[in-house]
C-alpha cells in the first residue's frame, strides 16, 4: 500500500511538471488606462501610423492616432519608440488546446468517432492549461479557433482568447461554426498497386457520401423548422444554427470541382460557406468572387500539391486569391505550429502581398471571416485591446520578438515552459541567456 | 481451281501427328512424316535474306530445304503461295505461359505480426524472395487456349518464367505447339531470372528497394562462400551457383532500375539482359553505356482523357510527355545500336500488339529491326538461335504465311505453323473479292452488289436503281469457297432474302447458288464481277519523330533540354557572407570560374566573365541539409530488422524527384540523404549535390566520407506502430542499448576472424570466412572509416550511446534531431560530437516534450558543432528561415546562425574542404539572395552548384511558360487522338512519395494515410 501511495505521489509530481505551469497564471483585468507611445502602429486594415499612440482602458481601445493624440491624465504612459504594435494575431481552425502530444491518444481530443457529429463541441475540450498555449502567445497569437476534425461533419468550433483559467474564461465566441470535410470526386491512384483503394471504390464512396450529406441536410433543415420537435435529436439540434445564421459552415475542400459542388450545395440551403484549405481555389477564383465566398487558405509553408505546379505556388497562393478579389485569411494545420502563423503571413508578403495586406490575413480578415470583427482584428477604437508589441517586424522570424502582449487589456505573462527549460539549462551550462 | 479446293480441304485435317518415342500408344501407331512444300512464296529467311518466288520444304517438324527452283520429291503436300509471304514466326522472350499464376503480393504493413525468416519447408534460403530453385520447365504445362491467342499474333516460341521473387530461378523456351509438354520444350533452362520485387515472399525483409538490392548483393557473396564450405546445405544457394553460367535476365521497372541493376551486376562480373520498362529513351546514353541487351515492352500508355480542364490538371507533365514519346522508344534504341528484343509483355490486350508495333514503326523503328527484335534477337538472347529465329535449314518449322509484308498495315497472317503443324489464323483467300457485281436473282431481276471494306472484313451493299430504288447493307459471310448473303430490300419484296452459294469461276469472279425469299420460295442467283473496287484514300495523319516534343532531363516538369553548364561569373557589389575570417563583406565581388570560387574581393574583373549586378543583394554559401529524405526511390526505411547496415541509400537515388528542383529554389545545394529511423542500426547514407538533370550517379557528392544512420527511442522501439509491432527486439530503451552492444561485439569478432584468415600465410585447410555486408559496415565504423549520424531525442538514450561508443571503441559523429541535446551538451562537447537539430519542432510525441527552440543556441554556446536540418521536403526549402530562429530564440549572432545551415553541417560531414564557405578554391556552391538571407522576405534568385546555375528565379518563370505551352500542345494532341478513336484512360492524381524518418512505405509496402 505504501508503495502505491508513493508511486501515486511520484506520478502526481511528474504530471504537474509535465502539464502545469504553476507560475504562469492568467493576467488580472486591466485597472488603469495604458498609453503606448512612439511605436509604428499596424492597424490591421492596411493603415500604418508611424510614431503613433494607442490608448486602451478597461480592456477596450480608446484612442489610436499619431504623436499628437491626447494622453489621458491617469494613463500609464509607456514609451515604445521604434517598436511595432499589431492587433493580436488570430489562428483559425486548428488543434491548439485539443491536442497536447499527437502520438499519445490520451492527449488527443480533436476527432470523435463516427461520420456526422455536428453536436460535438470543441469549446469544452479546450485545455487552457496546455503547456503549448503560452509558447504560441509568445509569438503574438492571442486568439484561436479550436476546431474538431474528421468524419464528414466534424463538430462545432468556438473562438477562444489564449489567456484563461478555464474554457468559460477563454470563450470569445462560442459554438460559432460547424466543420465539414467535403467528399472528393477526384480519383487518386497510387504509384504502387496493392493497398490503394480502387477507382470504383473511390467513386462509390463519393456517391455514398454525397447522398448521405444531401439527405442529412434536408432532414436537418426540416427539423430546424420545428419549434418543439417531438423527438429531440442532438445532432439536428446542433445543425439548426446553420440555417438560422448563428453558425457558420467551415468546409474543408480542395479540388476545383469539389469547391464548386460544395458552394452550390450550401447555397442550396441558404448558407454561405467558409472554405478551408481550398488548394485549387485559384482555378475557380471567378466563381468564388462572384459568390463572395471567403477562403481560409492553408499555411504558405507547404509544398505544391502537383509536381508541375509553380514551385512557389503555396507561397503565392494568398496573393493570387487576394488579387482575384477574394477575402482571404491564413491558417496552419496542427497545434503547436500556430506559433509560426506570423511567418506564414510574412511569406505571403514576400510573394506578392504588401506587408499590411499580409498582416490582414492573420488579423482583420480572419476576424471578419470568424464573425468577430466588431470586437477584434484591428487597432480601432471600441475594439478589445488585443495588442502585441514586437521589437521588430513581427511577420519576419528574424525580427519577431514579442516583448508585451495584452488580451482585452490584460498584460499577459509571456513566459512559457520552453523559456523555463532554457533558463534552467543555460544556468547549468553557464551560458548567458 | 482444283488446287484451291484442295487447299481448303487441307485446312480441315490435322497436318501431322508427332509421336513421342518414349510414350506407349493406345491402338495403332499413326506416324506421319509431316512433309510439305510451299512454293511460289516470298520467303523472308531472316531480316537479311529474302528469297523471291521461293520454295520452303519441311519434314518431320524441321525445315528441310529453302531456296529457289528446288526439286520437290514425291510424297510432299504442295501448297502454292503465289504472291504470299513466309516469315519466321515470332518469339516472345518474356512470358509466364503455361505456368500457374502467381498470387498477388499481399502486404499487411503494420496490421500483422512480423515474419523474420522463411516459412517454407525444406533446406531453402532464409529469405523467401531468394528462390532460384524455381525451374519453370519443371512445372510447365502447355495451355492450348493461351497458345492459340499468341499464335494469332504470329508468335511461335516463347520464353516462360515464374515472375515471383528477387532470384526467380530459370526460364524455359517452348514452342506454342499443342501436342505434348515433352515435344514443345526447346530449351529447359534459357536463363536465370531476377527482379527487385520480392513478390509473394512472406519474409518481411526486404521492404524497400535498397533492401532488395542489398539482399541480392549478399546472396552473390553467400553463393560464392557456399561453394567452399561444408557447414550447411542450402538448396537455394546450390541452385543459384548452378545458374551462373546461363544468360542472366533482370526485370526492372524503369531506366533508373536498369542503371541500378547494371551497377550491381558490375560488382559481380555479371552482365544482365534487362527486361525493361520502355522508358529507355529518357536516358539513352546511359542505357547504352550499360552494354546490356534489352527485352523491351511496347505497352505504350493510352492517351489521357483531358477534355475537361479540371481533369487535365491531374495528368502530370511527365505523364503527358511519356505518352507522346514512349512509341519512339524502340526507334531510339535502334538508332543507338542497342541490341533489343521486343515483347508483348504488359499489354492490356493481345490485340494491341500489332497496333503498337506499327506505331513504333511509324515513329522510326525500321521493319528490319522490328523483325530481328521479334525473331533472331530473342532467339540469340535465349540461346535457342540454332533452333528458331530464322528459316534456315535444320531449324524448327516455325513460320508464318502472310498476305503482304509482315509489318504492312493491310497484312493478314493466314497461317502460323509451329513445329511443322498448321494453325490457321485467317482463311487464305483466293484473292480480293472486292468490286462491283451484277447480282441476278431469278424472278427478281438485276441488282448491284458492291463488296468493299477491307480484305477479310468485307462490307457489302445491295443497290437497286430506278423504280423502288434502295441501298441497303447486306450480311456477308465467306467460308472458303462458300458464301452467305442476307439482306432485306424493305419493299418489293419486304423481308430477308437469304442467299447461299459458292465461288464458281475465278475470272471473271462469279458466284452461284440458291436463294430463299422471305415467303419461303426458293430460286437461284448469280453474281458476276463487273468493276473493280476503288478504295477511298484515307488521310493519314503525319506521324513520326518530327512531330514529337523534346526529351528533357529529367523527363518531368522543370527538366532541361540540355544540362546547364558551368559559367564564369562575377557577382558585383554584394553583401558576401563568407563564413571565413573575413566575416560578412559589404559591396564585395565573388568570381566563379570552372566550377570553383576563383576570388572574393573588391573590383574584380575578367574578360570572359558574365557580370551580375548584386547591389543590395546577399551571397551566401549554398545551404547544406544534414538530414534529408528527398530523391529516394521506393522506400526510405528497411526497418524489418534491428540492424540493416548493409542497405545503402546510394543504391536507390531518384534523380527525377521534383523536390531537387524545389529545394534549389530554396538555396539548398547539398543534401545528406538518410535512411529512416525505424531501426537502431539503419542503412548507409548518401550525400548528394542537387545537380538537377543528372543521373543518380551524377548526383553523388563524390569523395566524401561515408555515413550510416543510427536511431534511438520511440521509432526503433516501434512505440507508435500499433499493437502488432510488439515482437521485434527492442521494445524498450533498455533493449536498444543491447542491440548496439551485440552488433558491435559481433562486428569485432568478425573483424578478428577476417584478420586471422587474411593474415594466415598458409591458407590451405582454412575455410574462407563468409563475407557479411552488415558486419563489414560496422567494422568500417570501428575502423573510423564510416561515420554515424544518430537519430536521437531524450538525454538518457543520448548518454547511453555515447557510453556504448566509448566502451566499444567507436565514435558517434553526429546526433541528429537531438532535441534534448541542450541537456547533455557538455558531454557531447567533451567528445567532439556534433548536433544537428530542428529549430522549433516539438510535442508531436512523448520523447519531444522537452524540445525547446533554444536547443541550437545552448548546444552552440556549450561548444557543440551545431546545425539545423529539415527531415522534411518542405522545410528544406527555407532552412535559411529556420536558421533565423536561432537568432530569435536565444540570440545567436546572425553570422553564426547562418553557419547552422552552411558551414557547420559541412564540417560535421567532413566536406568543409570543398563546401560551406566562400573561399577561393572551394566549390562554387552559392546562393544569391534578394535580401538579408535570414529574413522571411529573402528569395533565392540564383542557386549555383559547382559553378552551374541550376536555379534562376527569372528562368523559372520562362520555364513555367514553356511547360504550359508544351502541356497545351500535348492536351490538344490527346484530344485529337481521342476524337480519332484512340483509347483513352481517365486521369487520376498520383500521390507523390514524400518521406520522413517514420515513413514505412517502400518497394513492397504502402501504408495508407489516415
Image (cartoon, rainbow, N blue to C red):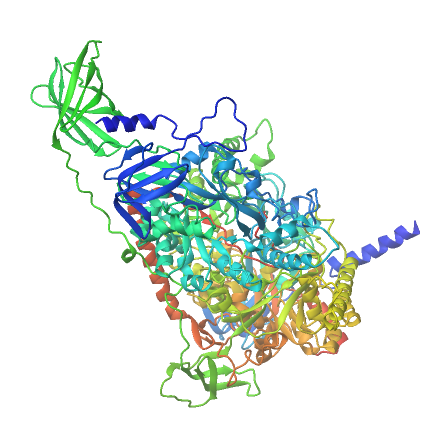
B757 displayed left or right of B146: right
Q: Residue at x 54, y 60 (%)?
A: B270
Q: Position of residue B346 (x, y in %)?
A: 45, 45
From this viewpoint, is residue B819 visible?
Answer: no
B928 displayed left or right of B865: left
Q: Note whether B271 is above or below B562 in the view shown.
A: above
What is the quadrant of residue B208 in the picture?
bottom right
**Quadrant that contains the N terminus of chain B:** top left
Q: Position of residue B449 (x, y in %)?
A: 15, 25
Q: Note whether B661 is above or below B460 in the view shown.
A: below
Q: Note whether A90 is above or below B753 in the view shown.
A: above
Toward the bottom, the furthest residue is B603
What is the quadrant of residue B741 in the picture?
bottom right
Q: Residue at x 38, y 84 (%)?
A: B609
Q: Position of residue B926 (x, y in %)?
A: 48, 77
Q: Residue at x 36, y 88 (%)?
A: B607
**Foreground of the two, B97 or A194:** B97
**Foreground of the two, A392 or B306:** B306
**Foreground of the two, B999 or B763:** B763
Q: Position of residue A25 (x, y in %)?
A: 71, 61
Q: Note whether A220 is above or below B447 in the view shown.
A: below
Toward the left, the furthest residue is B466
Amino acid at each position: 500500500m505504501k508503495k502505491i501511495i508513493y508511486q501515486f505521489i511520484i506520478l502526481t509530481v511528474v504530471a504537474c511538471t509535465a502539464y502545469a505551469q504553476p507560475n504562469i497564471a492568467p493576467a488580472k483585468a486591466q485597472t488603469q488606462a495604458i498609453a503606448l507611445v512612439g511605436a509604428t502602429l499596424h492597424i490591421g486594415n492596411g493603415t500604418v501610423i508611424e510614431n503613433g499612440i494607442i490608448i486602451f482602458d478597461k480592456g477596450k481601445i480608446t484612442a489610436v492616432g499619431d504623436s499628437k493624440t491626447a494622453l489621458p491624465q491617469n494613463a500609464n504612459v509607456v514609451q515604445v519608440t521604434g517598436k511595432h504594435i499589431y492587433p493580436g494575431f488570430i489562428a483559425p481552425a486548428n488543434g491548439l488546446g485539443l491536442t497536447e502530444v499527437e502520438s499519445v491518444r490520451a492527449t488527443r481530443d480533436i476527432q470523435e468517432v463516427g461520420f456526422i457529429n455536428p453536436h460535438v463541441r470543441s469549446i469544452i475540450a479546450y485545455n487552457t492549461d496546455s503547456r503549448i498555449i503560452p509558447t504560441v502567445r509568445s509569438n503574438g497569437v492571442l486568439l484561436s479557433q479550436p476546431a474538431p476534425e474528421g468524419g464528414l461533419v466534424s463538430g462545432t468550433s468556438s473562438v477562444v482568447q489564449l489567456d484563461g483559467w478555464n474554457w468559460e474564461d477563454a470563450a470569445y465566441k462560442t459554438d460559432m461554426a460547424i466543420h465539414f470535410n467535403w467528399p472528393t470526386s477526384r480519383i487518386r491512384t497510387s504509384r504502387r498497386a496493392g493497398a490503394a483503394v480502387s477507382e470504383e471504390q473511390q467513386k462509390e464512396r463519393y456517391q455514398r457520401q454525397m447522398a448521405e450529406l444531401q439527405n442529412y441536410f434536408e432532414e436537418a433543415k426540416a427539423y430546424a423548422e420545428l419549434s418543439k420537435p417531438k423527438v429531440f435529436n442532438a445532432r439536428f439540434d446542433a445543425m439548426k444554427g446553420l440555417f438560422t445564421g448563428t453558425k457558420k459552415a467551415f468546409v474543408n475542400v480542395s479540388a476545383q470541382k469539389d469547391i464548386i459542388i460544395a458552394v452550390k450545395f450550401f447555397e442550396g440551403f441558404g448558407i454561405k460557406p467558409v472554405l478551408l484549405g481550398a488548394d485549387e481555389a485559384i482555378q475557380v477564383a471567378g466563381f468564388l468572387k462572384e459568390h463572395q465566398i471567403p477562403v481560409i487558405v492553408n499555411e504558405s509553408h507547404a509544398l505544391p500539391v502537383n509536381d508541375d505546379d509553380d514551385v512557389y505556388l503555396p507561397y503565392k497562393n494568398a496573393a493570387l486569391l487576394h488579387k482575384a478579389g477574394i477575402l482571404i485569411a491564413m491558417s496552419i494545420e496542427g497545434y503547436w505550429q500556430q506559433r509560426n502563423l506570423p511567418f506564414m503571413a510574412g511569406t505571403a508578403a514576400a510573394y506578392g502581398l504588401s506587408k499590411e495586406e499580409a498582416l490582414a490575413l492573420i488579423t482583420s480578415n480572419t476576424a471578419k471571416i470568424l464573425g468577430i470583427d466588431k470586437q477584434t482584428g484591428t487597432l480601432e477604437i471600441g475594439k478589445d485591446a488585443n495588442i502585441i508589441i514586437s521589437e521588430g517586424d513581427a511577420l519576419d522570424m528574424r525580427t519577431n520578438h514579442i516583448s508585451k502582449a495584452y488580451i482585452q487589456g490584460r498584460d499577459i505573462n509571456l513566459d512559457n515552459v520552453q523559456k523555463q527549460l532554457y533558463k534552467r539549462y543555460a544556468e547549468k551550462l553557464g551560458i548567458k541567456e | 481451281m482444283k488446287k484451291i479446293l484442295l487447299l481448303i480441304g487441307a485446312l480441315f485435317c490435322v497436318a501431322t501427328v508427332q509421336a513421342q518415342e518414349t510414350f506407349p500408344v493406345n491402338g495403332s501407331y499413326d506416324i506421319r512424316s509431316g512433309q510439305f512444300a510451299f512454293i511460289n512464296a516470298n520467303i523472308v529467311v531472316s531480316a537479311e535474306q529474302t528469297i523471291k518466288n521461293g520454295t520452303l520444304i519441311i519434314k518431320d517438324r524441321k525445315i528441310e530445304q529453302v531456296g529457289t527452283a528446288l526439286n520437290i520429291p514425291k510424297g510432299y503436300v504442295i501448297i502454292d503461295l503465289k504472291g504470299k509471304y513466309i516469315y519466321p514466326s515470332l518469339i516472345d522472350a518474356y512470358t509466364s505461359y503455361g505456368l500457374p499464376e502467381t498470387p498477388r503480393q499481399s502486404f499487411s504493413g503494420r496490421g500483422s505480426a512480423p515474419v523474420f525468416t522463411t516459412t517454407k519447408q525444406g533446406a531453402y534460403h532464409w529469405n523467401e524472395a531468394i528462390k532460384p530453385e524455381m525451374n519453370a520447365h519443371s512445372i510447365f504445362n502447355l495451355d492450348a487456349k493461351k497458345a492459340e491467342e499468341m499464335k494469332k499474333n504470329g508468335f511461335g516460341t516463347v520464353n516462360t518464367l515464374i515472375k515471383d521473387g528477387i532470384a526467380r530461378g530459370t526460364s524455359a523456351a517452348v514452342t506454342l505447339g499443342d501436342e505434348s509438354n515433352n515435344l514443345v520444350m526447346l530449351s529447359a533452362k534459357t536463363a536465370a531470372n531476377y527482379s527487385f520485387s520480392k513478390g509473394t515472399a512472406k519474409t518481411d525483409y526486404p521492404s524497400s528497394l535498397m533492401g532488395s538490392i542489398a539482399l541480392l548483393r549478399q546472396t552473390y557473396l553467400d553463393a560464392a562462400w557456399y561453394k567452399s564450405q561444408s557447414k550447411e546445405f542450402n538448396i537455394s544457394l546450390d541452385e543459384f551457383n548452378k545458374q551462373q553460367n546461363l544468360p542472366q535476365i533482370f526485370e526492372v521497372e524503369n531506366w533508373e532500375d536498369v542503371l541500378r541493376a547494371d551497377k550491381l551486376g558490375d560488382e559481380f562480373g555479371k552482365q544482365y539482359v534487362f527486361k525493361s520498362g520502355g522508358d529507355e529513351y529518357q536516358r539513352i546514353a546511359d542505357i547504352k553505356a550499360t552494354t546490356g541487351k534489352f527485352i523491351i515492352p511496347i505497352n505504350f500508355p493510352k492517351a489521357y482523357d483531358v477534355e475537361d480542364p479540371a481533369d487535365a490538371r491531374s495528368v502530370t507533365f511527365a505523364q503527358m510527355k511519356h505518352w507522346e514519346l514512349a512509341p519512339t522508344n524502340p526507334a531510339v534504341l535502334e538508332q543507338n545500336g542497342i541490341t533489343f528484343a521486343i515483347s508483348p509483355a504488359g499489354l492490356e490486350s493481345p490485340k494491341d500488339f500489332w497496333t503498337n508495333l506499327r506505331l513504333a514503326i511509324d515513329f522510326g523503328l525500321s521493319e528490319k529491326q522490328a523483325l530481328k527484335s521479334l525473331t533472331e534477337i530473342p532467339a540469340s538472347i535465349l540461346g535457342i538461335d540454332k533452333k528458331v529465329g530464322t528459316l534456315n535449314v535444320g531449324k524448327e518449322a516455325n513460320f508464318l504465311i502472310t498476305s503482304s509484308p509482315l509489318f504492312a498495315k493491310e497484312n493478314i497472317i493466314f497461317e502460323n505453323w509451329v513445329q511443322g503443324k498448321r494453325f490457321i489464323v485467317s482463311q487464305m483467300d483466293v484473292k480480293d473479292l472486292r468490286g462491283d457485281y451484277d447480282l441476278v436473282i431469278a424472278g427478281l431481276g438485276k441488282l448491284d452488289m458492291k463488296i468493299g471494306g477491307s480484305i477479310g472484313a468485307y462490307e457489302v451493299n445491295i443497290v437497286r436503281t430506278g423504280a423502288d430504288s434502295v441501298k441497303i447493307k447486306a450480311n456477308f459471310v465467306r467460308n472458303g469457297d462458300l458464301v452467305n448473303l442476307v439482306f432485306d430490300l424493305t419493299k418489293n419484296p419486304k423481308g430477308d432474302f437469304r442467299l447461299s452459294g459458292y465461288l464458281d469461276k475465278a475470272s471473271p469472279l462469279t458466284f452461284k447458288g440458291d436463294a430463299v425469299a422471305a415467303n419461303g420460295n426458293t430460286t437461284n442467283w448469280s453474281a458476276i464481277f463487273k468493276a473493280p473496287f476503288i478504295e477511298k484514300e484515307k488521310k493519314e495523319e503525319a506521324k513520326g519523330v518530327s512531330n514529337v516534343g523534346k526529351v528533357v532531363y529529367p523527363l518531368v516538369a522543370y527538366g532541361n533540354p540540355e544540362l546547364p553548364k558551368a559559367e564564369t561569373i562575377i557577382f558585383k557589389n554584394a553583401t558576401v557572407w563568407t563564413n571565413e575570417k573575413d566575416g560578412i563583406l559589404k559591396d564585395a565581388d565573388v568570381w566563379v570560374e570552372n566550377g570553383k570560387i576563383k576570388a572574393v574581393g573588391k573590383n574584380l574583373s575578367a574578360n570572359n566573365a558574365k557580370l551580375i549586378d548584386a547591389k543590395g543583394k546577399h551571397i551566401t554559401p549554398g545551404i547544406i541539409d544534414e538530414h534529408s529524405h528527398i530523391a529516394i526511390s521506393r522506400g526510405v526505411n528497411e526497418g524489418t530488422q534491428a540492424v540493416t547496415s548493409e542497405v545503402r541509400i546510394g543504391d536507390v537515388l531518384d534523380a527525377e524527384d521534383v523536390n531537387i528542383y524545389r529545394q534549389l529554389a530554396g538555396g539548398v545545394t547539398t543534401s545528406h540523404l538518410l535512411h529512416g529511423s525505424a531501426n537502431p542500426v539503419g542503412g548507409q547514407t548518401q550525400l548528394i549535390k542537387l545537380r538537377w538533370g543528372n543521373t543518380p550517379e551524377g548526383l553523388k557528392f563524390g569523395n566524401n566520407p561515408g555515413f550510416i544512420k543510427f536511431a534511438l527511442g520511440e521509432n526503433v522501439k516501434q512505440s507508435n506502430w500499433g499493437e502488432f509491432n510488439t515482437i521485434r527486439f527492442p521494445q524498450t530503451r533498455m533493449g536498444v542499448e543491447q542491440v548496439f552492444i551485440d552488433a558491435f561485439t559481433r562486428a569485432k569478432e568478425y573483424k578478428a576472424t577476417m584478420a586471422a584468415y587474411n593474415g594466415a600465410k598458409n591458407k590451405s585447410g582454412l575455410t574462407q570466412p563468409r563475407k557479411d555486408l552488415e558486419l563489414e559496415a560496422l567494422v568500417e565504423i570501428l575502423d573510423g572509416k564510416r561515420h554515424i549520424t544518430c537519430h536521437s531525442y531524450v538525454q538518457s538514450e543520448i548518454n547511453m550511446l555515447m557510453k556504448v561508443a566509448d566502451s566499444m571503441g567507436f565514435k558517434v559523429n553526429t546526433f541528429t534531431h537531438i532535441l534534448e541535446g541542450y541537456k547533455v551538451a557538455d558531454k557531447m562537447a567533451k567528445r567532439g560530437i556534433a548536433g544537428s537539430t530542428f529549430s522549433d519542432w516539438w510535442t508531436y510525441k512523448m520523447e519531444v516534450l522537452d524540445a525547446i527552440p533554444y536547443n541550437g543556441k545552448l548546444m552552440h554556446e556549450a561548444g557543440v558543432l551545431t546545425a539545423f536540418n529539415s527531415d522534411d521536403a518542405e522545410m528544406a526549402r527555407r532552412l535559411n528561415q529556420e536558421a533565423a530562429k536561432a537568432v530569435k530564440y536565444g540570440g545567436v549572432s546572425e553570422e553564426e546562425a547562418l553557419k547552422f545551415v552552411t558551414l557547420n553541417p559541412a564540417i560535421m560531414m567532413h566536406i568543409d574542404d570543398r563546401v560551406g564557405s566562400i573561399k577561393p578554391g572551394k566549390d562554387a556552391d552559392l546562393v544569391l539572395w534578394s535580401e538579408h538571407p535570414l529574413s522571411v522576405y529573402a528569395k533565392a534568385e540564383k542557386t549555383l552548384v559547382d559553378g552551374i546555375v541550376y536555379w534562376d528565379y527569372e528562368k523559372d518563370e520562362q520555364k513555367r511558360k514553356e511547360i504550359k505551352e508544351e502541356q497545351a500542345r500535348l492536351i490538344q494532341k490527346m484530344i485529337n487522338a481521342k476524337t480519332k478513336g484512340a483509347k483513352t484512360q481517365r486521369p487520376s492524381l498520383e500521390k507523390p512519395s514524400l518521406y520522413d524518418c517514420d515513413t514505412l512505405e517502400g518497394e513492397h509496402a504502402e501504408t495508407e494515410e489516415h
